[in-house]
């Protein structure tokens, strides 16, 4: 049997890494951007959220687009757009201009995750999908964890605008290689053997209709599991956006870290998450094989959020700064331990419409991501308290755990 599907996974991991470069990079560069453009905390919060707002608006249409025409073309367009707007961010000299660029950036990058999920759903059998999703998020979080160190080093001899331009060119390389090598279906790829194709397609749903009328919108909107996935992912992404937006500023202003050391500590949550991504995917797949798909997804989901909540609440309360960031980083890892189960469940429930259902879930997440930086900025600005936003996040994680009692991966939208 050939192993072409692992090369597909490697491309997806590289995609995750590339798209996370900008998300984490702008958080590290935020103090320099705020100083250059004379921005307040709430204004910078809106800059963070402009990207997320557009990302959420265009997530479902782009996920449906990938279901209809295939992810080869859609992901090529997304990553090329990413490169262009990473570079355009570097040209910002005014607050409104920066808002517009970040909004358009988010509109173009929308759909990257659902289309990656669809790619893995077409190239991996059900028994391997959550593990593949976990490895996919490893790429994102590894890049996110290393980016603060890289940016801190580059800022020693390069302006923040030059850093963004340098990062922007990486996406063009990926897009060219992806379009040239990848095919939407294993049956279309000349390197895939008959044995591997049969293994992948054994329990796989048929391809989605190319007609928008073929998408069961009402069944998706009324499906209890889809609703549970959306609320659950709202809580996860709300918490996650703290780590990729305000965490560096929090470490400097609330915990007293120097600008020279903040790059290392700001990367800890995502570096810890690399291990959690992999173990979470493996764990949910193994539990699914042993206890069934519902128990296998829900057990990981509930445990992830409960531990994330506990570590976040304790970390926010701890006085010692290094201990506090380690505990908060462990909370981040536990919140990301759920990703294999979450995206695996979205693909399970979505069936042949995995891209659309994944997009619904991720759109709900982006609503949380949009609100998170803005609410934090206002809470800190008005109450001069950095702990309160973290307590809110800890409470939301408990809500995320409760959602898994509603989610049943056996309930496909077509049924």
Image (cartoon, rainbow, N blue to C red):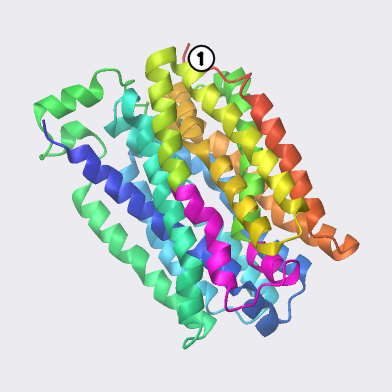
Q: Which residues are magenta?
A: 246-274
Main SS class of the magenta portion in the image: helix
Helix, strand or loop at mark 1: loop
- Residue 30 is left or right of residue 408, and the answer is right
Comparing 2 with 117, the one in front is 2
Residue at mark 1: 411
- Residue 193 is left or right of residue 84, and the answer is left
Point 69% across, 46% down: residue: 312
* 102 versus 194 height, above or below: below
**x and y percentages locating residue 203 in the rendered image:** 29, 18
* 242 versus 171 height, above or below: above
- Residue 169 is left or right of residue 374, and the answer is left
Q: Few, some or many C-alpha atoms within 10 Å of disc 1 (few <14, some 14-19, many ≥20)? A: some
Q: Is 269 in the magenta?
A: yes
Q: Is 65 in the magenta?
A: no
Residue 409 visible here: no
Point 31% across, 21% down: residue: 204
Point 24% across, 18% down: residue: 202
**x and y percentages locating residue 358 in the rendered image:** 49, 34
* 175 versus 129 height, above or below: below
Q: Which residue, as the protein is rendered here, is positioned at the far top?
A: 415
Comparing 337 with 99, the one in front is 337
* 339 versus 249 height, above or below: above
**x and y percentages locating residue 364 in the rendered image:** 63, 39
Point 33% across, 24% down: residue: 127
- Residue 97 is left or right of residue 337, and the answer is right
Residue 228 visible here: yes
């Amino acid at each position: 049997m050939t192993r072409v599907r692992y090369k597909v996974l490697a491309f997806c991991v590289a995609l995750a890494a590339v798209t996370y470069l900008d998300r984490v990079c702008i958080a590290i560069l935020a103090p320099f951007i705020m100083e250059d453009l004379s921005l307040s905390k709430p204004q910078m919060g809106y800059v963070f959220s402009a990207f997320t707002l557009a990302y959420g608006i265009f997530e479902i249409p782009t996920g449906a687009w990938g279901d209809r025409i295939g992810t080869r073309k859609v992901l090529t367009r997304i990553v090329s757009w990413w490169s262009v707007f990473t570079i355009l961010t570097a040209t910002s000299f005014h607050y409104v201009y920066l808002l517009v660029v970040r909004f358009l950036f988010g509109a173009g990058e929308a759909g990257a995750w659902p289309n990656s999920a669809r790619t893995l759903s077409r190239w991996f059998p059900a028994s391997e999908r959550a593990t593949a999703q976990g490895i996919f998020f490893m790429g994102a979080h590894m890049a996110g964890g290393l980016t603060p160190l890289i940016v801190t080093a580059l800022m020693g001899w390069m302006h923040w605008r030059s850093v963004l331009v340098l990062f922007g060119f990486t996406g063009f390389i990926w897009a060219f290689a992806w379009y040239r090598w990848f095919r939407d279906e294993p049956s279309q790829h000349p390197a895939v053997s008959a044995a591997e194709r049969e293994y992948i397609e054994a329990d796989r749903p048929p391809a989605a209709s190319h007609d928008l009328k073929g998408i069961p919108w009402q069944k998706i909107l009324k499906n209890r599991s889809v609703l549970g996935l959306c609320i659950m992912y709202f809580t996860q992404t709300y918490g996650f956006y703290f780590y990729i937006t305000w965490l560096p500023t929090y470490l400097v202003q609330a915990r007293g870290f120097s600008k020279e050391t903040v790059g290392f500590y700001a990367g800890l949550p995502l570096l810890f998450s690399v291990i959690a991504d992999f173990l979470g995917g493996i764990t949910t797949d193994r539990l699914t094989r042993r206890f069934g798909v519902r128990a296998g997804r829900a057990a990981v989901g509930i445990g992830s959020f409960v531990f994330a909540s506990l570590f976040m609440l304790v970390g926010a309360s701890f006085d010692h700064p290094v201990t506090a960031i380690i505990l908060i980083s462990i909370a981040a890892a536990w919140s990301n331990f759920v990703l294999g189960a979450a995206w695996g469940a979205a693909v399970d429930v979505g069936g042949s419409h995995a891209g659309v259902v994944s997009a619904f879930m991720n759109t709900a997440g982006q609503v949380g991501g949009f609100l998170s930086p803005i609410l934090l900025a206002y809470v800190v600005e008005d109450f001069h308290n950095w702990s309160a936003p973290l307590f809110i996040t800890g409470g939301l994680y408990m809500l995320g755990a409760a959602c898994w009692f509603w989610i049943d991966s056996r309930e496909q939208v077509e049924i």
